[in-house]
Image (cartoon, rainbow, N blue to C red):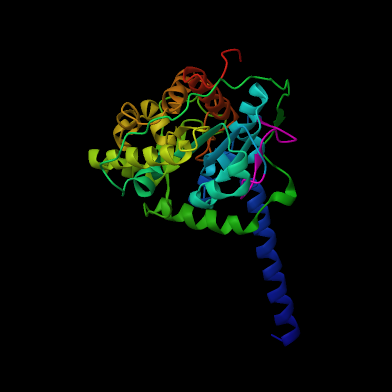
Amino acid sequence: MSPRRYFIAIVTISLGLVVAAWILAWWLEPLYGDLTRIGGYAERDYGWNAPMEEFHPLLATWGETYDHPVDVLVIGDSFANLRPPQQWQNWLAARTGWRIHTLDKHKVVLGDLIASRTYRLAPPRLVIWNNIERDLKDEYGKGSQQCASNSVTARLSPMKLHPLGISALNVMRPTDLWAVNPGFARNWLWKTLLRKANIRGSEALLLQLKRTDLFSSRTSGDLLVYRNELQKGNWTDVELDRIRCSYSEFAALFEENGTTRFVTAIAPDKSSAYRPWLRNPSDVPPSRLPALLDDFPVPDARLDGAIADAITRGISDVYMPNDTHWGSAGQKVAADAILKLLIKEGLSHEQF
């Protein structure tokens, strides 16, 4: 073969592979969820097909610093930060009219935050700590088992409600051609081959549900979760005590000024939320949140109960089928549960 023909053949084959990868990626549909991404699962099968709700413009703010006075400061992980237009903070702001700002707990230094000029001159009325169940042991279960009980130094008057009367917009999962990711086609092919060979190829775990009305995906009888959610079955009572102490210390730190209250909103793992509806519940250990929160030193929104109730009632996409995070239904449930907690604690009026 002449060099010219060889060159043409190589270019033709390369272009053919690129086109094939693009067509396969288009067939898989644009990548959206974290569990489809790490697991190599097709969005066409596991993506949500009912509308989600988003706020444009945002009704709350997000950032890396506390740089303006607010009524409520939220500190949390991806359940508070991942996709701002969808987050529960917007729903809470819409129903209350409160100024709400969110910080990423992985990026904030609490000592620097509390010592900052804006915080010292205008501390928030309320701090809400929002994080996921599966990370509790690793992040908060390594400290002291003996901790001083937190005592609130001031009783604050209820925050007034000023509902904004703003509605969310319905959005659909992206299907635009420009959003297609040809590189994911290779990932899908590789991980599909591993699954066919019964070889563990990712940290995403596929489980079977005994109900098919809980997700809007094509494979609505399947449940995708993070594999590390299985680790909670090994948590000890000592570690639960240490987690309680960590949150008690957070409360003492924020409430020391006498003008700020501290509450938590701990999100249940997706596997915990849907465990009652698994074909084989023994595949997943029971949630440890009831044992942890029934004797908790800080007021908590008990999202575990609120989420369980919504799923039991058959509300679709409380969690996204392709993702470990809530859909808009779950975001609204979280906002409602948090507001109910604040009413119970005397931090908000009852009309909402």
Residue 272: give x, y in percent of width and height: 39, 33
Queried whether the magenta region covers residue 66, the answer comes back as: yes
Identify the main secondary structure in magenta: loop
Give the residues drawn in magenta, as a range: 52-67
Q: Is residue 96 above or below residue 1?
A: above
Q: Is residue 39 above or below residue 282?
A: below
In magenta segment, residue 141: no
- State which quadrant residue 239 falls in: top left
- Residue beneath the point at 51% across and 31% down: 220
Of the pair 80 and 41, the residue shown nearer to us = 80
In the image: residue 128, left or right of residue 53 = left
Q: Position of residue 88 (x, y in %)?
A: 59, 31
Position in image of residue 1 (x %, y %): 69, 85
* Foreground of the two, 38 or 59: 59
Asked if residue 293 shows in the view, the reply is: yes
Describe residue 187's horizontal placement relative to residue 5 as left or right: left
Q: Is residue 8 above or below residue 343?
A: below
Q: Quadrant of the C terminus?
A: top right
Classify 283 as above or below 34. Answer: above
User: Where does residue 73 sit, x and y in percent of width and height?
Assistant: 57, 37
